Amino acid sequence: MDKKIIELKKEILRLKNIAAEQEKEIEKLKSLADYDFLTGLYNRQGFLREAERFVDLLKDSEKFFKVGRERRKFAIRNFSIIFIDLDNLKKINDKYGHKAGDKYIKICADIFKKTLRDIDIIGRWGGDEFVVGLIDTGINEAEKVAKKIKNALSRAKIKGMPGIKPSASFGIIAVKNQEGKIIADMIKLLEKSDKAMYQAKKKSGKGAIVVFA
């Protein structure tokens, strides 16, 4: 075989390998774009994408969806949102520095992950705000989950920050209201859960849970 043809084939193969590696890097970057760098949770964009997927599934419960590597058929009866605002972050940042504040956020994020089911979704909305999507969960069950998270936070201890006890305020809303109507606009749902959370803060300052009415 002509030497030039052999060299050309080698060069083509090399370029194909480079293209394949670049494709892998692009897919990796696309995945990272949906996650918060500090906590490893979904960021705002990632949470919205996943939450909207489940709301669509609620509207058509015969669809298939994927959980990790396992594919299941799942009939969703409801989908609830918990908007969470952590307490004490400003106090920690002012007293111990922003590195300690980041530690506090990560500890709380880990508590959320351990408290929730694998199937549920959670994202860092920004700063000290988090949002949880509870799959196949109505408002009463969502309130129980919020209480479970609240209790888990209250039991946590943070080394190097004496006097700081993790706590948060919670606002809850269900996609399907009591009349059975589905509120399909995720932004409106999040705004309402956010409003309920601020009502919780005004209610007692720390640790309150309010269901949007």
Image (cartoon, grey):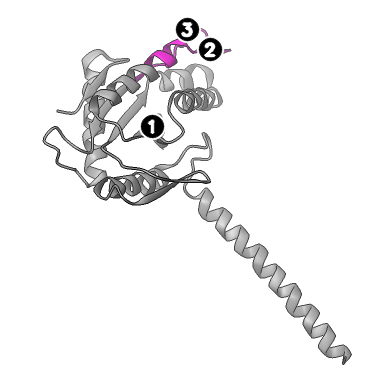
Question: In the structure shown, which secondary structural element does the residue marked by tag 2 occupy?
Answer: loop
| Quadrant in which the C terminus appears | top left
Q: Position of residue 153 (x, y in %)?
A: 43, 16
* Kind of residue at badge 3: Gly
In contact (CB < 8 Å): disc 1 and disc 2: no
Q: Which image quadrant is residue 169 in? A: top left
Q: Given contact means CB atoms under 8 Å apart, are the residues at marks 2 and 3 in contact?
A: yes
Residue 130: numbered disc: 1
**Which residue is farthest top?**
163
State the extent of the magenta-drawn residues as a range.
Answer: 150-168
Is label 3 or label 1 in front? 1
Residue 125 is left or right of residue 71, and the answer is: left
| Frontmost residue, 175 versus 158 | 175
Labelled disc at residue 163 = 3
Q: Quadrant of the N terminus?
A: bottom right
**Residue displayed at 25% across by 13% down:** 204
First in sequence: mark 1 vs mark 2: 1
Mark-to-mark CA distance, 2 and 3: 6 Å
Left or right of 26 in this view: 118: left
Q: Earlier in the sequence, mark 3 or mark 1?
A: 1
